[in-house]
Amino acid sequence: MPIIPTDFTIDDQNSSNEIEDILKPEIRKTAIESIREAFAFFEKYSGNAVNNNEPLTEDQIAKERKKYLQSINNIAKEIVEEVLYHNNVTLNLVDIKNPDNYTYNHVVNVAVLSLVIGIELRMDKNELHELCIGAMLHDLGMTFIPKSILLKSSKLDEGEFEIIKTHTTKGYEYISGQYELPVSAKLIALQHHERLDGSGYPSGYEADDIHKLAKIVAIADVYDALTSDTPYRRAVAPHEAIELVMGSAGRLFDFEMAKIFVRKIVPYPVGSLVKLSSGDVGVVQEIRLNYPLRPKVKIVRQSAVSIIIKEVDLMVETNIVVEGLQFETPNASVPHYLQKRIDE
């Protein structure tokens, strides 16, 4: 488990304890459909490839590609407006996790998470729009990776992992000539796996060599990937993913960006049923934005003769921790390709 820096403190007097879904269902649905259709087209007609049943000329392919990118551009504007409207709330993604359509849900979640950070950094609307487009296209290169590797449930060998890593350059190369896309969005696709200490890929860039928006998407991408179920592996608990981000701040991830992220993401919102290391199960009663992993929890202990209802303050009971949400599978494993790309 990563060591949390002793100076990793959060001071936010203006945030609200209110938890709500940021995106309207219809906007999320439209975004997912836009990304699904675009990625399917990009995969079918990558480069100059044509399908024998539906032959298209190079000009037709270029025209269709532009249409799909414009669709993503339009939905990005809607998402920015929606997140700006809710910019004073902390974010709960627990209720919108869905193993179906993982790839497309992941892209939308990463866009929302990235925007939350960007807004806290006081970016203007144009920069937020560029951030959102880049986040929605950050894993475009995965459409060019063989499905046999992407869906492999056993450990990847070194050669297969090297192929996975090419998704950053493949995605960048595919959109590099699209002049309607901002340069920063293209760099997000290329650099979202770079790390501050130079341990990332594809170029091993360090600190200031990495584009600011790519640093933001890097945090959002790792958190959402770790906390999402897929058909072939279980998610890790939100607190473990949060601790990873906190413990990697200043080494893998930008310190200030990680600090903002932890303040705005609540892994266990009020009303959540959680498992405690004491063996008890309880309901979260209160959260502290400065200490998202140490809520107040109401537990019920029942014996043959009595029922005891007790409130446990994890800021006081420091020997007790939240082990996860009650519906989570114990000992969920981190997928092998994430283990490789995150230095724990």
Image (cartoon, grey):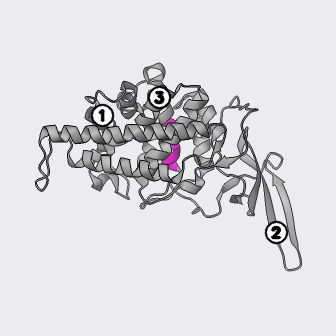
Marker disc for residue 301: 2
Percent of width and height locating residue 65? 25, 40
Marker disc for residue 213: 3
Residue 283 visible in the picture: yes
Q: Marks 2 and 3: CB-CB under 8 Å?
A: no
Given the image, on which type of amino acid does mark 2 rest?
Arg
Mark 2 or mark 3: name the one nearer the start of the chain: 3
**Where does the magenta region start and end?**
218-226
Q: Nearer the viewer, mark 3 or mark 1?
A: 3
* Residue underneath mark 1: 169
Q: Is residue 113 rendered to the left or right of residue 101?
A: right
Looking at the rendered image, the quarter that the N terminus falls into is top right
Given the image, on which type of amino acid does mark 3 rest?
Leu
Name of the residue lying farthest toward the top: 208
Label 1: element kind: helix
Percent of width and height locating residue 256? 60, 27
Question: Is 219 rendered above or below residue 318?
Answer: above
Name of the residue lying farthest toward the right: 305
Question: Is 84 rendered above or below residue 40?
Answer: above
Packing grade of label 1 (10 A; few <14, some 14-19, many >=20) is some
Label 3: element kind: helix
